[in-house]
């Protein structure tokens, strides 16, 4: 069991370290405040846990078995990514002409909106659902009860990633003196918005 747990946490580290839409959104939100960044992390990890529970119940298999259901969810996820990308680009445009201190907190999201953004982005990604279905069962020890073990692993996965992504939030906060400059902040908003927009287009075009 300890060996399985170590292997599981190692795999969780590799997953979290792989750049994706959630990473971009977390860093983007952390540019406004640590609070926004951390609440976005909590929303994202709620989505991770939800997909883990759904996979434990075997419901994710319905998604993988239905091409129509998967495509509907894929297009929905692409729309969410594009919307977040456009929003970031608009924020960057509005930030033009402001002084260095104004707009840092005011352009940040409310706590609920930051949490909701992280949750929505994760739940709108069909790849997260399919991945949970293929990932978690590999670490269920032989003879262990399937449902409670997978739910426990999903919870551990989510908690571990809260700690991992929390480091991103902390690091961005440490660079606040540099990142709070209006020009730097605007450029980072443009980059994050462009990346989210491209990821949304790519998801829409995938077969």
Image (tube, rainbow, N blue to C red):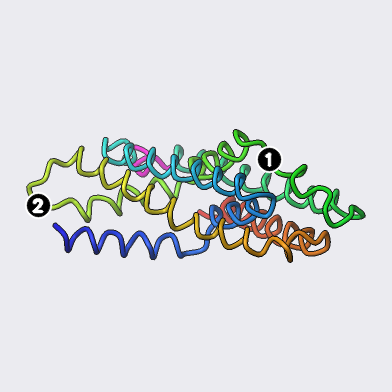
Q: Residue 66 placed where, x, y %?
A: 39, 39
Question: Which tag, 1 or 2, sits closer to the chain's start?
Answer: 1
Give whichever of 148, 196 is nearer the camera.
148
Q: Which residue is mark 1?
A: 109
Residue 40 falls left or right of residue 177: left
Asked which secondary structure carries label 2, the reply is: loop
159 with respect to 34 (left or right): left
Does 60 sit above or below residue 128? above
**Given this view, does label 1 or label 2 mark the residue nearer the observer?**
1
The verdict on residue 39 being magenta is no
Name the residue rendered at 20%, 38% in the picture. Answer: 148
For the residue pair 148 and 100, the one nearer the viewer reads as 100
Q: Is residue 153 left or right of residue 16?
A: left
Residue that label 2 marks? 142
Q: Secondary structure at mark 1?
A: loop
Residue 46 rendering spot, x and y as whole percentages: 44, 40
Residue 131 tag number: none
Q: Is residue 10 left or right of residue 83?
A: left
- Residue 152: quadrant of the picture: top left
What are the residue bounds of the magenta stretch?
62-67
Q: How many marks?
A: 2
How many C-alpha atoms fall within 10 Å of the one at disc 2: few (<14), some, or many (≥20)?
few
Question: Residue at 34% across / 49% down in the picture?
Answer: 132
Q: Is residue 66 magenta?
A: yes
- Disc 1 crowd rating (10 Å Cα; few below 14, some 14-19, many 20+) is some
């Amino acid at each position: 069991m300890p060996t399985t747990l170590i292997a599981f946490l190692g795999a969780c580290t590799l997953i979290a370290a792989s750049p994706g839409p959630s990473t971009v959104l977390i860093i983007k939100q952390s540019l406004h405040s640590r609070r926004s960044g951390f609440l976005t992390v909590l929303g994202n990890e709620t989505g991770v846990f939800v997909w883990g529970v759904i996979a434990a119940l075997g419901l994710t298999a319905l998604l993988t078995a239905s091409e129509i259901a998967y495509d509907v969810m894929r297009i929905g996820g692409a729309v969410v990514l594009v919307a977040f990308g456009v929003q970031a680009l608009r924020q960057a445009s509005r930030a033009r002409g402001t002084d260095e201190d104004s707009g840092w907190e005011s352009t940040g999201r409310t706590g609920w909106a930051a949490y909701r953004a992280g949750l929505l982005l994760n739940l709108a990604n069909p790849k997260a659902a399919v991945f949970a279905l293929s990932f978690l069962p590999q670490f269920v020890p032989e003879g262990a009860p399937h449902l409670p073990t997978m739910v426990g692993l999903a919870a551990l996965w989510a908690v571990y990633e809260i700690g991992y992504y929390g480091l991103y939030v902390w690091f961005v906060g440490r660079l606040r003196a540099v990142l709070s400059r209006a020009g730097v902040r605007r450029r980072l908003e443009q980059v994050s918005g462009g990346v989210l927009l491209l990821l949304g287009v790519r998801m829409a075009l995938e077969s």
